[in-house]
Amino acid sequence: MQPLWAAAVAAQTPPGVEIRFHDDRLESIPFDEPADLVGISVETYTARRAYQIASEYRLRRVPVVMGGIHASLCPGETARYAESVVTGCAEGAWPELIGDLGRGALKKFYHGGHAPTDAAWRYDRSIFSAKRYLPVQLIEFGRGCRLSCEFCAVQTAFHRTYSGRPAEQAIKEVAAASSGASRNQLIFFVDDNLACEPDRLKQFLRDLIPMRVRWVGQAGINVAHDPEMLDLIVRSGCRCLLIGFESLKPANLKEMSKPINEARGGIGQAVRDLRRAGVPVYGTFVFGFDDDLPDDFERTVAFSVEHGFLLAAFAHLMPFPGTALFRRLAAEQRLLNESWWLDPGYSYNSVAFQPLHLSPDELRRYCLASRRQFFSWSSMMRRSLATGFHQREYWVVNLLHRVELSLRNGHPLGDQSWNKPLLPAG
């Protein structure tokens, strides 16, 4: 999908500054193209590749600035491979940084705050033209999350804050995305939790209803306990709602600091209410907590199939740097590699810590088996009969996820063919 961060940075770039955008996932980077500054957004999973790219530019004496969530979580590490680092939201720092670059006075660190100003919620999507992205329009309604989940990098980076974007701006973007040649385009509200401010979301959904759009998004379990909210979600065109159920075990929910999932009848009641309202659910679960045992995996898959989830994810815990989970596992000496994201031997689905009742490889295999079971032919057929989802769309998204299981498993981080040393910034 289109990387929305790049459009946000482009919109904040002062007039007269020439921009080139390259997506390392889709194309080769023209390292020898003349540049005065290179900006790279870094996630933990892409940190190793980001440092490789930065090293290539450092060989060419081109300064590099890095931002993104990993830069906020690990500013010291990121600073080793960048001439400048932006923490927080880029909108609050980018114009100043460009001004300093023009004066030859680039600082090592810039902090953009936890939210853009109302006027700064802008995106220049022209940089995406001629690139082959999925026909999905990404739109922000807000940024951050107020929940305190122990393992979550988002709430850590944003210090449990949430900032709502002016709703009229988001409505204008929805209108633009649902007109002309883009009329049937799917809209993805990228907020980590759409429902941080329920009353504000309800009004937004009311405004969406006459626009007859199709959208997907992510929300907390609290939406399931509000009949008015569920009605508005369905009537406004929701095609799928991702909800982090995390675990069926109360002890695990307590351990991860997510008691909200136990409120008002717990996950079982929430799922029944969602199904009764006709909300297609993408349920996500996390394993590796101290109360997890081998039979919990199959029980969770059976629960997801029984309740006719459109999609489901069964992931193992990831100790992202800076999170409370990372600090706890480090204190308990259970991290297998404190900088797993830089380890050349690490790959997708590897477990980076020692679970209490399972070996790391057992946890990896159980999670992978759960995904395969959920996306097995028998499960997909049974769920197709239970869901109210359009059958063609149902089979397309489920088959895509079934194929993805094999493609991502064991995929390395970074470019394995890159055999040069990482060059630190001076």
Image (cartoon, rainbow, N blue to C red):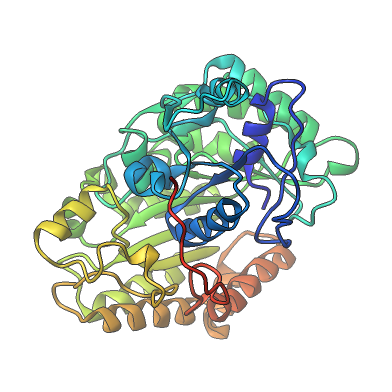
Can you see residue 314?
A: yes
360 or 141: nearer the viewer: 360
300 or 59: nearer the viewer: 59
Point 19% across, 72% down: residue: 355
- Residue 213, placed above or below residue 209: below
Q: Which quadrant of the view contains residue 325?
A: bottom left
Can you see residue 272?
A: no
Image position of 390 (left or right of 248): right
Point 31% across, 33% down: residue: 160
Image position of 346 (left or right of 172): left
The percent position of residue 278, horizontal first and vertical second, equals 56, 50
Number of marks: 0
Image position of 94 (left or right of 131): left
- Residue located farthest toward the right when viewing the structure as drawn: 180
The percent position of residue 92, horizontal first and vertical second, equals 51, 22
Q: Which quadrant of the view contains residue 415?
A: bottom right
Point 15% across, 66% down: residue: 290
- Residue 273, placed above or below residue 416: above
The percent position of residue 234, horizontal first and vertical second, equals 60, 42
Quarter of the figure with the C terminus: top left
The percent position of residue 27, horizontal first and vertical second, equals 73, 61
Point 34% across, 51% down: residue: 269
- Residue located farthest toward the left when viewing the structure as drawn: 332
